[in-house]
Image (cartoon, helix red, strand yellow):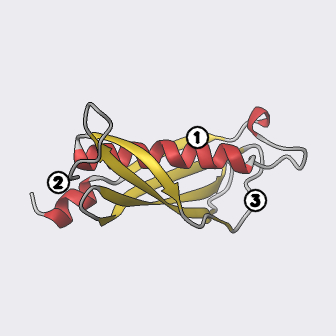
Amino acid sequence: MTLAERMEASRTSIFKAVFPNTTNHYDTLFGGTALKFMDEVAFISATRFTRKRVVTISSDKVNFSKAIPSGTIIELVAKVSKIGTTSLEVQVDIFLEEMYADQREKAISGVFTFVAIDDNRKAIPVL
């Protein structure tokens, strides 16, 4: 498998319904909950790419472009976007979908960086 094919194969998608227990007093998804969901799908994507133990080392600028209201569906899409020696970056986008209408738009995007580690938690090559 080529590197480009491997990066494409790392694409991971998760759907979730936004319920009131995940929203703030404005009835929109908590930012911290969105970050948790994003880190989770990014971790899965990074693991699928490396097939090694990985840990999050940073999250770069996360853009909250659109509020996500309760009662909607979100799709989190993650894909490895950049590869270093011991680390890799995963682009994550959250798309908002109305439950009862054909509307879909990007609401949040960000980049998460992971490092591959061995049994002693020392950095190792991702490839």
Q: How many marks?
A: 3
Mark 3 crowd level (few <14, some 14–19, many ≥20, 10 Å Cα): some
Q: Are marks 1 and 2 in contact (CB under 8 Å)?
A: no
Whichever of callouts 3 and 1 sits on the residue coming sooner in the sequence is: 1
Q: Residue at x 11, y 63 (%)?
A: 2
Q: Residue at x 89, y 50 (%)?
A: 26
Percent x, y for residue 127? 17, 54
Mark 1 crowd level (few <14, some 14–19, many ≥20, 10 Å Cα): few
59 versus 53 height, above or below? below
Residue found farthest to the left: 1
Residue on which the image places disc 2: 127
The image quadrant that residue 68 belongs to is bottom right
Disc 3 element? loop
Residue on which the image places disc 3: 67
Disc 2 element? loop
- Whole-angstrom CA distance, mark 3 to mark 1, is 15 Å
Instruction: Give the number of the disc on residue 54.
Output: none
Whichever of callouts 2 and 3 sits on the residue coming sooner in the sequence is: 3
Q: Residue at x 64, y 48 (%)?
A: 34
108 versus 17 height, above or below? below
- Whole-angstrom CA distance, mark 2 to mark 3, is 37 Å
Residue on which the image places disc 1: 16
Percent x, y for residue 58? 50, 55
